[in-house]
Amino acid sequence: MLSRVAEQSAGRTAEAAPLAEAGNVAVRLDGVSRSFGEITALRKACLDIRRGELMTLLGPSGCGKTTLLNLVAGFLMPDTGEIVIDGERVNQLPTYRREIGMMFQSYALFPHMTVAANVGYGLRMRGVANAEIARRVADTLALVKLTGSEERRPRQLSGGQQQRVALARALVIRPKVLLLDEPFSALDRNLRASMQIEVKEIQRKLGVTAILVTHDQSEALSLSDRMAVMSEGGIRQVGTPDEIYRRPNDRFVAAFVGDASVIPARLDHVSEMTSTVVVGAARVCVPTRLLEGLAPNALVDLFVRPEQLAVADEAQPVAVEGIVVAQVYQGGHVDIHIDAAGAAPARLLIRLPGHQAMMRWSVGSRIGVAITTAEAVAFPRQAR
C-alpha cells in the first residue's frame, strides 16, 4: 500500500505521456545561457522535461550540466532565455518559491539535527503545522524505509541511510520537480546500484518529475526515461537511452556514450534514408542523414559497439584482421582488445560471453574480426 505521500502524488503518473502540448511540460528551458566572466558555461540551451519523467543530464566535467541544474533550482540566474516550471516563468523567482526538492551530492544534512528534524526542516520553514509535519515526515520516512530512525543523528547512519534521509527531505515538501545532483557518487558500487533502483522506484511511485545530473554513463542509461547529452555548454542530443546508444546524432555522442570502436570504411551506396559502407569484406547499413553531402567512394568512420563485433568464423566476412593484445575478465563477459594496425586508428574492442574466450583467443593470437550487426552509424572521415 502506498504511503499518504505516494497516494497524494500518484495521480501525476498518468500525465507522463509523450510530449504533445505545453500542458505536459513540467520544466522548459528556452534559449538559456549563462556565463562566468569570459567562460560560457551554458549556451542557448533548449529543453522540455515532461511531467513525471526522469531526465538525466549526462556529460563530462565542465560541460554545463550542473550549471543547468542550478539555473532550474534558482541558485543561478540566466543571462538570456527563459526558464518555466509548471507553466510559470521563474527567471527571477527565488529558490524557496520554485517548489523544487534538491538532493545534493554531499547530502548536506544538518549534523546536530535528528533524522526527523532534518526531513521536516523544509516544512517548518514553510510554516506547516506541527501535527502535519509529524504525519508527513512519518509517511516519507516509511517511503524511504527509514521508519524507526527518527531520533538518530546523521553520524549514526550509513552512507545509504544518509542518502535516504536526503531524499526524504527533498520529497516531503511535495515538490513540482526533484533535482538530483550526482547523488550516488559517494556510495560504493553495490550500494550505488541498489540505491539507484530504489530512487527510481520511488520516483515512479510518486510520479514526480526528476532531473538527474551524472557523468556515469551506465547510471544514465539504466535510470533515465530520457537523457540529454551535453558538451562544452551545449545540449548535443536528447532522447531515450536506446535512441542515444543506438542512434547517436554526432561523433561526440557516439564516442562518449558507451564503448565504441572506430573503423575506417568506404561509402559504397547512397540512398535517401539508408546508405551502405564497406569495410574489408563486410557491408553495413548506416543512416544517410549523418553523411550528408558525401558521394560513393568517400571515406567514412564506422562506429561499432563491442557487442556488434565477433571473432570471425569460416562463414562470416572478415572486416579487419588483428592481434589480440589484451584480455579483461569481467565475470559475465570478457573484453578482448585487438590491435588492427593499418586497418583502424585504435584498438578494437570485442565483448564476448563466458570465460572460455580467454583460452580460445589468448594474447598474441591473430584473428579476423566480423561485424555482426546489419546497422550501425558512420560519420565523415575525421583527419588524424
Image: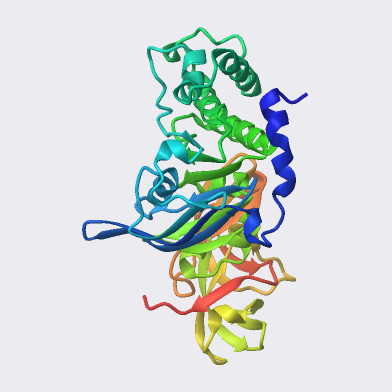
Residue situated in front as seen by the camera: 91 or 267: 91
Residue situated in front as seen by the camera: 256 or 314: 256
Residue lying furthest left in this view? 37
Counting the numbered discs, the total is 0
**343 relative to 23, above or below:** below
Q: Position of residue 281 (x, y in %)?
A: 64, 79
Q: Position of residue 288 (x, y in %)?
A: 61, 82
Residue situated in front as seen by the camera: 31 or 329: 31
Query: At 45% from the left edge and 70% from the top edge, which residue is drawn?
Result: 341
**197 relative to 92, above or below:** above
Left or right: where 384 falls relative to 89:
left
Q: On the rendered image, what quadrant is the N terminus found in?
A: top right
The reply to whether residue 360 is visible in this rendering is no
Left or right: where 332 falls relative to 103:
right
Query: At 63% from the left edge and 47% from the top edge, which residue is drawn?
Result: 53
What's the image's color scheme?
rainbow
Q: Position of residue 256 (x, y in %)?
A: 47, 58
**248 relative to 215, above or below:** below
Query: At 55% from the left edge and 29% from the top edge, which residue is drawn?
Result: 173
